[in-house]
Image: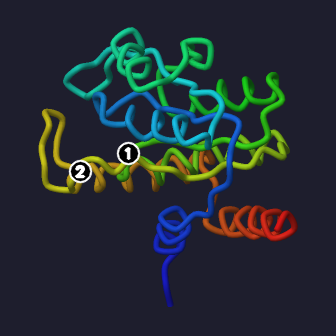
Amino acid sequence: MITDREKIIAIVDNDCFSKSDAAILLEGDGFFRVNKAAELYRNGLVSKIVFSGNVVDRDYGSYPFEENKPLLLQSGVRESDLIHEDKSTHTRQQAVEVIGLAEKMGWKKLALVASSEHQYRAYLTFLREIIDKKSDIILYNTPARQLNWFQDVGWGMRIDRLVGEFDRIEKYTELGHLATADEVIQYQKWKEALMNESY
C-alpha cells in the first residue's frame, strides 16, 4: 500500500496543465525560478506573472523583486504583465495574498512555480486556501527544475532541503495549514474532469 506522501508526490510531479491566467512565481531559490515563469509567459501559456514575496534573506536564497524584475524583463516579459505581491513573508501568507488577488482579478487558472523540493508544500498550502475559501480556482503544478539534486548553490543541496520540506509538511498538516492527501486526490479528480469536458 502506498503512503499519503507518495500519493501527493505522484500527483504533484505528474500534474496536468492548461493555459492559465497567471504564473505565480514564489520568491526564493535565488534566481532559479525566474526562467520557468518566463518560459510559460513566452510560450503564451500565461498572460501575467505574479512575483510573490517580500523577504530579503540571501543566505536562504530569497532575493528581492527589484533584482528579479530585470531578469524577467530581459526574458521577454512586459512590465505591464508583471505584478509584485509584496505583503507576504512566508508560504502561507503567499497563498492568502495570491488567492485573494486572483479572485479580485477574476483569474480562474494559476500556474504555481516553485523549486522541485518546495513545490509539494507550496501546492498543499495554496490548495488549503482554495478549499477553505470554497474557490473554483484551478491550480497547476509547474515546478522549476533547472538545478540538480546534489548541487549546492549557497543555501543547501536540494536533496537535503527536501528532508526539511517534508518535516514542515508533517508539522503544518497537523496544524491544519495544508491540504490533506484525500483533499489533493478529490481536487485532482475535479480538475481532470473539467479538463476532459473541455476536450
The answer to whether the residue labelled 2 contacts the one labelled 1, judged by CB atoms less than 8 Å apart, is yes
Count of residue discs: 2
User: Which residue sits furthest top?
Assistant: 66
The x and y percentages for residue 11 are 56, 68
The residue singled out by tag 2 in the image is 158
Looking at the figure, which quarter contains the C terminus?
bottom right
- Amino acid type of the residue tagged 1 in the rendering: Ser
The residue singled out by tag 1 in the image is 115
The x and y percentages for residue 191 are 76, 62
The x and y percentages for residue 131 are 77, 48
What whole-number distance in Å separates the C-alpha atoms at marks 2 and 1? 9 Å
Q: Is residue 130 left or right of residue 49?
A: right
Element type where label 2 sits in the image: helix
Report the residue at 57% width, 63% height from top.
Answer: 15
- In this view, 194 is above or below 31: below
The x and y percentages for residue 55 are 39, 16
Crowd tier of the residue under label 2, counting other residues whose Cα lies within 10 Å: few below 14, some 14–19, many 20 or above: many
Report the residue at 46% width, 24% height from top.
Answer: 76
Q: Which mark is residue 184?
A: none
Element type where label 1 sits in the image: loop
- Residue 126 sits in which quadrant? top right
Choose between 95 and 101: the one closer to the eye: 101
Crowd tier of the residue under label 1, counting other residues whose Cα lies within 10 Å: few below 14, some 14–19, many 20 or above: many
- Amino acid type of the residue tagged 2 in the rendering: Arg
Report the residue at 47% width, 64% height from top.
Answer: 13
In the rendered structure, which disc, 2 or 1, sits on the residue that comes first in sequence?
A: 1
Report the residue at 37% width, 18% height from top.
Answer: 68
Q: Is residue 84 left or right of residue 33?
A: right
